[in-house]
Image (cartoon, helix red, strand yellow):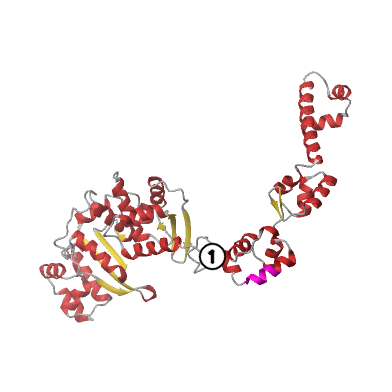
């Protein structure tokens, strides 16, 4: 351990600068010097670097000598807009250090090589490691003041949860490609775009006229906001792009193909459905003879549906599929199915209340009203209500000249009844 520290202390400033400029990181420097990589040697190395006033950003600064520094100075091409969105999603740009770094899964390495080629960086300087849940990852960093400053001026500065905002790009096509890069980085298979910045998602919602609301989600890894990007917008984004993340584009196409499928009954299949829709999957286990026997026994379709613990619509579709005429088993009058019309009318004639009748027969107010609206009781009640309204208007007019007792004498009604109408 002491020998490692002694070797580091014996280095001159020129030797240190040469080592830093020709090596990718500190671990490689220590390997060249044949010394151990531990806390004491790292501390000693950093101390000497600071004493000689060698900038830490000088480390790795020469790893990309041919990088195009002004790549993101102006967003005047679709490739620049896309990769700027990708950096906004997956890049890390510290506020005080001129560095852009990525930590990505190995399955996206081929796609990331497209970014390296676009900015003309050195693809050999990747650091491979094993991340959480044994996922193979790689790390890539760029130390270049001009290159990083051009990215920062578009509002991409970490921590992005607070600072990230939609860049001031006025060209509609460039806005589309920026969103595509952002979605390739932080989008999900369900079409949701995740971000820690509420301001960013609000701006996207406004620019692309998305009617969906922004939702807040929290789990053991942290919290974020999510916005659902509609299918038509996602399809348009992938339509003309040749350098996007193919993995997500393939999944998007598979999803759209799955949603186009139809069941044999004509219903659209959901992503969870395999062969039959939710209606058919519940009723397909029943044979034609079994259903016919139930219909003959119970005589009404809705009772059979209750017996099988399924909805009437599901049973109807299965009967149509098996070519069974279901119409004789429906009881339809005034557009209302499955109700005992006579019992409802007789009860309403006694109670003279639609609310009480609906509670008695466990049906909605509208259904009961449709059945009883042709009865004499309903018409008389309606006329009485109109008469009461007219009387109330008359009392309000008379109150300007007379007292309640005088109005009661004129109309030959009780004072209590007139007060009730007036204040009611």
Q: Answer left or right for 313 relative to 185.
A: right
Report the magenta stretch's main SS.
Answer: helix
**Mark 1 — residue?**
277
Q: Answer left or right for 183 relative to 284.
A: left
For the point 50% across and 60% down, the residue is: 268
Whole-percent x, y for residue 346 in the image: 83, 48
* Vertical side of 213 occupied by 101: above or below: below
Q: Which residues are magenta?
A: 286-293
Residue 328 lies in the magenta-colored region: no
Residue extending furthest toward the left? 14
Q: Answer left or right for 310 relative to 129.
A: right
Q: Quadrant of residue 194?
A: bottom left
Q: Toward the viewer: 203 or 350?
A: 350
- Give SS at disc 1: loop
Q: Quadrant of residue 207?
A: top left
* Vertical side of 10 occupied by 210: above or below: above
Q: Tell me the quadrant of the picture where the N terminus can be found.
A: bottom left
* Vertical side of 183 occupied by 221: above or below: below
Q: Tell me the quadrant of the picture where the C terminus can be found.
A: top right
């Amino acid at each position: 351990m002491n020998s490692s520290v002694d070797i580091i202390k014996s280095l001159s400033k020129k030797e240190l600068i040469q080592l830093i400029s020709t090596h990718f990181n500190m671990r490689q420097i220590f390997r060249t010097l044949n010394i151990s990589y531990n806390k004491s040697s790292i501390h000693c190395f950093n101390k000497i670097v600071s004493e000689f006033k060698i900038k830490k950003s000088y480390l790795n600064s020469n790893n990309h000598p041919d990088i195009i520094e002004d790549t993101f100075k102006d967003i005047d091409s679709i490739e620049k807009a896309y990769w700027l969105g990708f950096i906004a999603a997956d890049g890390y740009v510290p506020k005080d250090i001129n560095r852009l770094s990525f930590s990505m899964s190995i399955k996206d390495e081929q796609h990331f090589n497209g970014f390296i080629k676009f900015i003309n960086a050195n693809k050999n300087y990747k650091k491979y490691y094993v991340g959480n849940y044994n996922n193979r990852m790689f790390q890539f960093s760029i130390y270049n003041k001009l290159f990083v400053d051009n990215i920062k001026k578009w509002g991409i500065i970490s921590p992005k949860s607070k600072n990230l905002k939609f860049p001031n790009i006025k060209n509609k096509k460039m806005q589309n490609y920026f969103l595509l890069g952002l979605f390739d980085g932080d989008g999900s298979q369900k079409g949701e775009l995740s971000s820690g910045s509420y301001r960013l998602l609000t701006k996207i919602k406004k620019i692309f006229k998305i009617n969906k609301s922004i939702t807040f989600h929290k789990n053991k890894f942290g919290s974020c906001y999510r916005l659902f990007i509609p299918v038509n917008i996602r399809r348009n984004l992938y339509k003309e792009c040749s350098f996007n993340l193919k993995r997500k584009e393939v999944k998007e196409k598979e999803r759209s193909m799955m949603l186009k499928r139809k069941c044999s009954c004509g219903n659209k299949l959901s992503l969870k459905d395999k062969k039959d829709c939710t209606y058919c999957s519940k009723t397909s286990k029943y044979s034609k003879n079994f259903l016919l026997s139930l219909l003959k026994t119970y005589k009404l379709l809705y009772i059979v549906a209750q017996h099988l613990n399924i909805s009437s619509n599901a049973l109807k579709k299965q009967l149509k599929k098996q070519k069974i005429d279901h119409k004789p088993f429906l009881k339809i009058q005034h557009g209302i199915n499955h109700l005992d019309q006579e019992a409802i009318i007789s009860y309403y004639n006694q109670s003279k209340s639609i609310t009480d009748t609906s509670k008695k027969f466990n049906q909605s107010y509208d259904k009961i009203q449709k059945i009883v609206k042709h009865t004499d009781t309903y018409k008389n009640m309606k006329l009485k209500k109109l008469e009461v309204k007219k009387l109330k208007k008359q009392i309000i007019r008379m109150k300007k000249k007379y007292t309640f007792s005088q109005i009661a004498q004129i109309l030959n009604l009780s004072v209590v009844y007139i007060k009730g109408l007036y204040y009611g």
